[in-house]
Amino acid sequence: MWNLIPALDCSQLLSICQLHIKGFNPNLTSSSGHRAACSQKTMADQAFVTLATNDNYAKGAMVLGQSLRKHKTTKKLVALIGPHVAEPCRRVLESVYDEVRLVDVLESGDTAHLALMKRPDLGVTFTKLHCWTLTHYSKCVFMDADTLVLSNIDELFEREELSAAPDPGWPDCFNSGVFVFTPSNETHEKLLAFCSENGSFDGGDQGVLNSYFNTWATADISRHLPFIYNLSSIAIYSYLPAFKQYGHKAKVVHFLGKVKPWSYSYDAQSGEVKGHSVAPGLCEVQPDYLRLWWEFYSGAVLPALLEAYGDTPFNTGCVDEKSHEEIREILTSTSQAASSSTSSSFAPSSSSSSPPPPPPKVPSDERKKRWEAGQADYMGDDSFVHIERKLDSFLK
Amino acid sequence: MWNLIPALDCSQLLSICQLHIKGFNPNLTSSSGHRAACSQKTMADQAFVTLATNDNYAKGAMVLGQSLRKHKTTKKLVALIGPHVAEPCRRVLESVYDEVRLVDVLESGDTAHLALMKRPDLGVTFTKLHCWTLTHYSKCVFMDADTLVLSNIDELFEREELSAAPDPGWPDCFNSGVFVFTPSNETHEKLLAFCSENGSFDGGDQGVLNSYFNTWATADISRHLPFIYNLSSIAIYSYLPAFKQYGHKAKVVHFLGKVKPWSYSYDAQSGEVKGHSVAPGLCEVQPDYLRLWWEFYSGAVLPALLEAYGDTPFNTGCVDEKSHEEIREILTSTSQAASSSTSSSFAPSSSSSSPPPPPPKVPSDERKKRWEAGQADYMGDDSFVHIERKLDSFLK
C-alpha cells in the first residue's frame, strides 16, 4: 500500500502516516525509524496498556492501538500478551505498540505463579494484574482489547488510581475495561494475595478489582470516569434516550458481551459486516461502531497481518475463502478508492471508502414503531438469533 | 380481620398493628386514634413522597406505604395523586399515608398549568415535579410507586438534594425512582421553566431532572446513593455475579420496565403469582421480590380495598372471577394460617403463609446451563413472550 503514497498530497500522507505508522512494517520488532519521522512527542513515562491472550484478542489489540495512534496519543503503547499469541500476530503487535511484553504466569516462578497454583481458574486475571509491574511508567491507562478509541483520551492521565467508569450492569461496580492505575510492585503483590485469598466474585478481573478497590462507589467522585470513556454497546439499547442525548460525546466504545467484533466476518469489497445490522431506530443516532472497528481492521491491521503471515493460512475475518493475494488486491483497490474520495468523519483516514451498509428492509423509524407496538419482525431483523445474541450480551 | 386480633398474643398484635395500622380502616381519612396507640415517633418535618396517577399506581403506592410502615419509618408519608384515582383508592391511600394531596395540574391555574400548556406531553412529569411544593417539610425522599422497601431507609434523610442512585441503563444518569430533595417553591418554578424550555430527553421526569441537576455524575460522591437503595430488577439479570455478591444488601427494589407487579395476577390461596417464574439460576440467590410485593398487597392492601369498594366491582388482581366475599374468606383463612405459623423472613408479618411457588419445570441450574449453551427453551420458559417482556423492560 505504500506504493500509493506518492499519489497523495502532504496532508494525506501525514494523516495515513499517523495511522499506519507501525502497521505496515510488520517484520520489524521496532519501527522506530518510521516513528521518528512522523510520530507525535510521546510522554515516555505514561502508557496505555492492553492485554491479548490469544490471536483474536491480539487483533482487537491491534485495532485498539491503531485507534489510539489515529487520535494522536502522546503516550506510549504497551501490549501484554499471553504465550498463546502466534508469532506473526506478535510481530504485528510489535509494529503497532511501543512495547510488547510476554506474560507467562506459568513460567514466571514468582508470586503470580504461586497465586495461580492456588486459583487456577483465575489465569487470565493474574495475567491482567501483571500490568501493575510496569513500574518503568509512572501512570498507565489499561484498556481491554475489545475497546475502540473514538477521539484523543490522553486527559485520562490526569486522574489517579483507581479511576474507572461505572458498569452499566451493576453501576456501583466499575467496569474494568478501562481504568487508570499506578504501576507498583507492592500493589501487584497485594492484589495477588487478595485474589488468592478471596477469589473473584465474577470469576474475572472485574470482580477482584472491585473487591480490592472497594471504596470506588463511595469515596471520591474524581475516580469516576465519565461513562463516555467506556461506553458499552449494551447501554445503547438499555436506555436509548440517554444514548441519543449523550452518545455523541462517546470517546471509547467497549464491545462488551460474548459476541466481539472479530466474531463477525467482513466483506472488504462492500465494507459490509456480515450478520450485523444496526438496531431499529439507531441508524440515525449512532455511528456504527462495529463497522468502524472493521474499517480500522481492514484498513490498518489486515494488510500487516497478510504480510506477517505470508503464505501461512490464518483467519483473516473476511468472507469467502479468498487467497491472501486476492484480499491484498481488494484492499489495494478499495484504498485507491479511498484516496480519491472523502472518508466518513469517524473512519480511519486511509480506510476503505466502503459504501454505506444496505438500507434495512423496513425503514428504521417504521421498525422502531412496530417494535414498540410489539410487532417485532420475529423471522427477520428481530429474529431469535439476533435477540438471543443481544441477550447473550446481557448474560455475560 | 380485626376480629382475629383477640386470638393473637401481644407481640403478634403489635406486629400486625404496625403493618396494618391504617390499612384496615379505609373509611377514615385520618386514623390518628389507632396511630397514636401503636406508631413510632414520627419526624414531622421530613417525609417520604410518592405519586399515583391512576388506580394501578395507587395500588403500588399502597404497597410502598405499607412496606415503609412495616419497616418502622419515623417519617411522614405523603402521596400525590392525579385526578384519575378513584375515590375508594383515594380513601385507602388516606388510610396508609399521613397526607394525600390531589395534584391536578390542569386545574391549578399556576405556573405548572402554564408549563403544561406549552408541553402537554409532559403531564405526569409536571405532576411529579409538584413534590417540590411540599414546603411544610424540610426534606423529602421521593419514591416511585413501583418501588418496594425491604428495610428501614430513614438514613436517606442524612443526604442532601439531589441525591439519587445511578441508572443501570446509562450510569452517568441517576434513576429518578428514588431521590432526596428539598422542597422549595423557587426550585419548583425553576424546574418548570427548565422543563418548558428544554423538554425532557426521555419524555419523562428522569430526563428533566438529570438535565437540571446536571452535575450529579461529576460533582459530589455523597449525592450518589448506593445502588441498593434503588435496585432495579433489570440489574439482577445484567450482571448476575454482582447481584449475588451485593444483592442481599438491597434496601429498595424498583420494578423498572413496562411490566409492573400489578400487571400480573395472584392466586391468594396458593400465594402464587401467575405468569411469573423466577429466572434460571436465581431461585437460590434472590428473594422473590415480585412475590413479596403480592404478599404485601394481599395481606395489607387488598382487604382495605375490598372494604372501600364494598360491592362495587374493581380489579382485585386475583385470579378467577371470585366475589369480594369469596376473596375475603380466602384472605381470612390464609391470615389465620399465618397467625399460627412462622412467616418467611421478608414477608409482611401478617401476610399469608403461602406455600413456596411450584418448582420450575426444569431445575434452574440445568436451565441456566442449557441457556448458556444456547439451548434456550424457545417454546417454553424462554419463549418469545417472556424474552420480549425482558427486552421491553430494557427498552423502557
Image: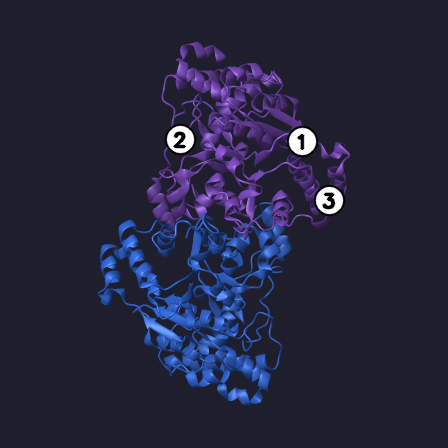
Chain colours: A purple, B blue
Q: Quadrant of residue A25?
A: top right
Compare marks 2 and 1 and give the one earlier in the sequence: 1
- What's the mark number on residue B282? none
Q: Mark 2: which amino acid?
A: Pro
Residue A196 on image: x %, y %: 72, 46
The residue carrying mark 2 is A357
Mark 1 is surrounded, within 10 Å at the Cα level, by few (under 14), some (14 to 19) or many (20 or more) other residues, namely many
Residue A131 on image: x %, y %: 64, 35
- Looking at the image, residue A136 sits to the left or right of residue B53; the answer is right
Q: In front here: A32 or B68?
A: A32
Residue B72 on image: x %, y %: 52, 74
Residues under numbered marks 2 and 1 in contact, where contact means CB atoms less than 8 Å apart: no
Q: Mark 3: which amino acid?
A: Arg
- What's the mark number on residue A82? 1
Query: Residue at left 34%, top 53%?
Result: B203
CA separation, marks 2 and 3? 46 Å
Residues under numbered marks 1 and 3 in contact, where contact means CB atoms less than 8 Å apart: no
Camera-side mark, 2 or 3: 3
- What's the mark number on residue A119? 3
Query: Residue at left 35%, top 53%?
Result: B208
Q: Mark 1: which amino acid?
A: Gly
